[in-house]
Image (spheres, rainbow, N blue to C red):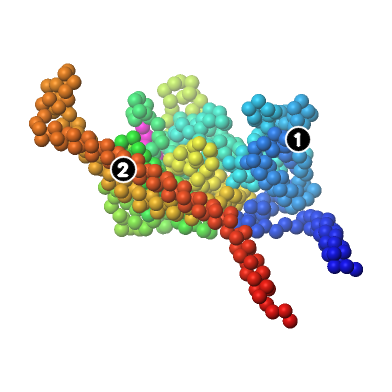
Amino acid sequence: MSARRYILAASVLLVAIFAAANLLAQSWFAGTRADFTENKLYTLSDGTRATLSELAEPIDLTFVYTRDVGQAFPAVRAYAVRVRELLDAYQTIGGANVRVREIDPAPFSEAEDEALAAGLVAVDTNGGDPLYFGLIGRNTVDDERVIPFLAPEQETSLEYDITRMLARLDRPEPARIGLLSTLPGMNALTEEAGYAIRREMGKTFLIEPIEENFVELPGEMDILMLVHPPELTDWQLWQIDQFILRTGRALILLDPAAKTAQGTGPFNMTNRQIRSDLDHFAAAWGIRLDDAAIADTETALSIEADTGDGRTTVLQHPLFLAIPPGLMSPTNIVTADIGRTINLGAPGRLILNDNAPGTREILMQTGPAPSDIPADRAALDLSPGDAVSLYQASDIGAAPLAVRLTGPLISAFPDGAPSPDLPDDPIYAELARAAAEEAPPHTSTSMVDADIIILSDADMLDDGLHLDLQTGVPFADNAALILNALDSLSGGSELMSLRARAPGRRPMETVDRMREAAQTRFFAEQARLEARLTRSQERLEELQTVGAAGGFFDGDVGSELTEGERVELARLREDMIETRGRLRQIERDFRSDIDALELRLRLFTILGGPLMIGLLGLVFFTRNRRRPES
């Protein structure tokens, strides 16, 4: 056989072997996966595996995706592949209990009718056919849960959302939470309004609002949640005391200086309740909230601050804390899987008494040298500079910010039930009297071990502290902490490890570091020029005020100035023009440097590999050419 025919036959044989190997691999290794991504994007978490292994009955998942329309949007197209692969993983591990199918709802088709009947959102595509991109879950008794639209921006919570859907379909009756709060964001009238955390709670739990003037707590309540509660009467405190002793489970968010508290009158500053506490239980629970708010330079959050001249800059504000995972308990199930910071606004110090009944475990704390800030000052909009001027590092160490209390407790009412405070309205008074008469008898000790989680900040629920308000993407794990706490108290812990999964998109950390270095270098010069510009403006306005006194109506703004002042006025104008020009040049240089850095890194990333392989090939080729033939 000639060399040409030999090469041709060998090539055909190699192609055949490659095709056969692919077919066999698809058959033999259909359920096998190897995940080489840094954050294990294609590996299901232990919480998902636990949920799948405990499914009692089959659940149908219907992936709804308008393929032809989605192809025109690269982000949607790529995310559809991600969703499809993740659902395949669920089906592989769930076996017969997870049945996945995909429908393509073309216009006026039965698939579109099914999508609309389930409540999926038809997204307008600027005149074209609508885009359907959601997920429907059904159990064997036709209970239905829907993700109306799978937004690519919500990729970080995709596995959590799907697993939560499965858990809710497998166990349709969620835990009931009684919620008492004075914050408007937690008392929204509809499921779509209020804080994002409140909306997320509604997807997993049954929320039963409690009125501020309650006489009795709701029956059949699994968890009591108090968020910046109002001042409570002895009767109401006794109701809480008895619930804890009988049921044991509560999540409590207190605040010494609630920035998000609402008042009345202009700017909502009248009758504003900035402090909430449960000091009546301090002796019985061994936990008390200090009077002052806490500032901490070690964990200070970077925020955008107004420089006073219409510009904004980024500064670290010690009253807004970004608590990293390193300052949280690595062993408690509530905080063990938290991967990002918990952002707080003027929290307080929890003072613990270890001689009291029960066990107190610190879940979250500040750095080693926080400072007390008067609560009435901290509740206002203090600037970073004002907060630093009030800062006096504490010598008693880190401040506990979240504590979990467990174990048997005794009643905070040793003398039994107090008399109820009857309202003035005769009808409500009669209802209150009847509720008091039907109240269960007083109990002095725990009927079940208590499990109470107390946080010293209620502002952390505000969307602005943990969400990008433009995209809705979280940048802190505030929601994960609250939902973890509720899951832990309700006994459903499978979802905890899913909430804090790292995002699939990796930030360009090298570029970010170089950008910060460039900011430091440029901002120092920028700050110096801006200070000079401010001084020049002040002096210019002073001279113009003096000079315009006599010539204002003549249009001569310098009629009252001396010759020296006129020269100074002209020099100031020239100086301001020059300074503004240099400031603009600095901003242009800053942007061009950042653009150049990003361009060089992208070129290196794109071309580095091929160039290296090409160079290696060239080296081997040259060596072979120079090697003498034997």
- Residue 518 horizontal side relative to residue 240, left or right: left
The answer to whether 261 is drawn above or below residue 19 in the figure is above
Furthest toward the left, the residue is 562
Give 230 or 22, whichever is nearer the viewer: 22
Name the residue tied to disc 1: 104
The answer to whether 218 is drawn above or below residue 552 in the figure is below
Residue 552, how many percent across, how many down? 17, 21
Query: What secondary structure characterizes most of the magenta part?
Result: loop
Quarter of the image holding residue 274? top left
Locate the C terminus and report the quarter of the image it occupies.
Answer: bottom right
Question: Amino acid under label 2?
Answer: Arg
Residue occupying image coordinates x 62% and y 69%? 619
Q: How many marks?
A: 2
- Residue 569 horizontal side relative to residue 363, left or right: left
Region rendered in magenta:
272-277
Name the residue tied to disc 2: 582
Give 132 or 162, whichever is nearer the viewer: 132
Give the secondary structure at mark 2. Answer: helix
